[in-house]
Image (cartoon, rainbow, N blue to C red):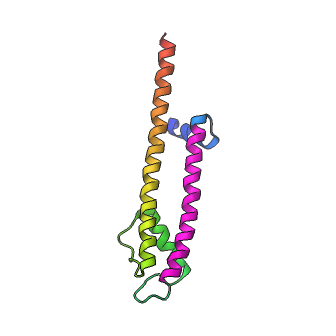
Amino acid sequence: MRRVLHGVRDVRVAATPRHWHLRERLITIVVTTFVVDAIGSTLMLLFERGASRTEISNVGDSIFWTTAQLLTVSSQMPNPVTTGGRIVDVVLMAYAITVVATLAGSFGSFFQRHEHIEALARERRSS
C-alpha cells in the first residue's frame, strides 16, 4: 500500500518525466471530460426540452443525464426522444469508451516503462 501511495504522490508532483507525462494525460482527460459534459448537457437541454415523452426537461435533469452517461454509459437512463438528442447520446457513449481505452493505455504504458526501467537498473547493479 505504501508503494501505491508513493506512486500517486510521484504522479501528483511529477517526480520524473514519466510521472509528468501521466499527470498531463490525466489532467487533459479530466478537463476535456468537464467540457464535454457541459457541452453535452447544454445540447441535451436544447434538443430535449419541450419534446413530448422526454424526461429531460430542465438544467438539473440535463446535467444529471449527461454526467451519468459519461460515467456509466448506462442503459437504465431514459433514452432521448429527439434525433439531435440521440446523436448527442451516441457521441457521449463513444467519448466515454474512448476515455476508458485511453486511460487503460496510459496506465499500461506507464507501468510497462516502469518495469523496463527497473529491469535496466537491476541489470546495471548486477554488472
Q: Is residue 9 visible?
A: no
Q: Residue at x 51, y 15 (%)?
A: 124
Q: In the figure, residue 73 lies in which quadrant?
A: bottom left
Please report the residue visible at 47 percent of the width from the left and 55 percent of the height from the top.
99
Q: Is residue 100 above or below residue 39?
A: above
Q: Is residue 17 visible?
A: yes
| Residue that sits furthest to the left in the current view | 75
Residue 29 at what x, y percent from top left? Answer: 54, 54
Q: Is residue 12 left or right of residue 40?
A: right
- The image position of residue 49, as x and y in percent, is 50, 85
Choose between 53 and 125: the one closer to the eye. Answer: 53
Span colored in magenta:
19-48
Relative placement, left or right, of 86 versus 42 is: left
In the rendered image of this protein, does residue 99 appear above or below residue 36?
A: above
Q: Quadrant of residue 35?
A: bottom right
| Dominant secondary-structure state across the stretch colored magenta | helix
Residue at x 55%, y 42% (from the top left corner):
22
In percent of the image, x 50 and y 39: which residue is there?
A: 4
Q: Is residue 24 magenta?
A: yes
Check if residue 126 falls in the magenta segment. no
- Nearest the viewer among 98 and 107 is 98
Q: Nearer the viewer, residue 126 or 87?
A: 87
